[in-house]
Image (cartoon, rainbow, N blue to C red):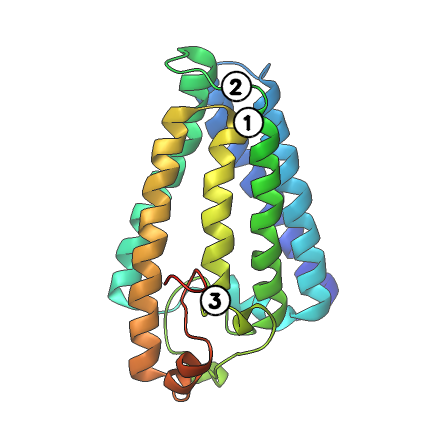
Amino acid sequence: MSRGVLLLGGALRLVVALVCIGALLFWGAGTIAWVRGWVFLCLLGVTLLVNLTLMVHRNPELLDARWKRHADTKPFDRVFGALYFVATVTMLVASGLDAVRWQWTSMADWLLYVGIALHVLGMLPVLGTLLTNPHLETTVRIQTDRGHRVISSGPYRYVRHPMYVGMILLYLGWPLVLGSWVAAVAGGVVIILLIVRTALEDRTLRAELPGYSTFCDRTRFRLVPGVW
């Protein structure tokens, strides 16, 4: 598939995703006159567009692979996918219900900037993994059809699962951007799910991917250097 086709396909998927996310946010809020909702959408759209453009030029085979569904996805990851989807949708809808429509809780305005900072910091390891690892598919499986091998360069020199580090930072920051403590609870559920997925994926790779145990000896920590 040519880079132009990949970029066009990715851009269309991005637009659809942003429309769906916006619909959830503003349906919960009951109005489109919600500044933090628009800030979140713009922030997400710009950074994802940057990710998409760089991936098309640096790691196009991964972009194509991430759009496909795979029959050999590990069973635990199918459960994770369902729970992750429900928790994320809950976070988006609850943010509008809480911050705008019913105002169950209140959040200081300055936390918006903390949330933006966490978003930017989170996108850095996410982008690093997307550009470095050609096997970074959306589900956990051993990619025998794609010559699956251990990647130990880039952000993988520091932790074994840098993508999840970035995602945890994103889910910490997004409720702050949206201004909702209720959304922060749902974001916390997603973070717990990501930590569990990290442990299960790491165990799978140790057992089934040649060379991964040696990689673990060099890069000792899964998510936080010196901790875990």
Q: Which residue is mark 1?
A: 111
In the rendered image, residue 208, in percent from the top left (x then y), is placed at 32, 83
| Frontmost residue, 106 versus 52 | 106
Q: Report the residue at 46% width, 42% height from top.
A: 171
Residue appearing at x 38%, y 78% in the figure = 142
- Numbered circles on residues, count: 3
| Residues at marks 1 and 3 touching, judged by CB atoms closer than 8 Å | no
Q: Secondary structure at mark 3?
A: loop
**Residue 65 in the image: x percent, y percent?**
52, 68
Question: Visible in this render: residue 2?
Answer: no
Q: Which residue position is annotated with label 2?
A: 108
**Given the image, on which type of amino acid does mark 1 rest?**
Leu
For the C terminus, the image quarter is: bottom left
Of the image marks 3 and 2, the number of the one nearer the N terminus: 2
Residue 36 in the image: state x and y as whole percent.
Answer: 58, 23
Indicate the position of residue 106 as horizontal and vertical percent values.
44, 15
The residue type indicated by label 3 comes to Glu
- Pair 1/3: label in front: 1
Query: How far apart are the two marked residues, 2 and 1, measured between alpha carbons?
Result: 6 Å
The 10 Å Cα crowd at callout 2, few under 14, some 14 to 19, many 20 or more, is: few
Q: Where, by quadrant of the figure, is residue 18 drawn?
A: top right
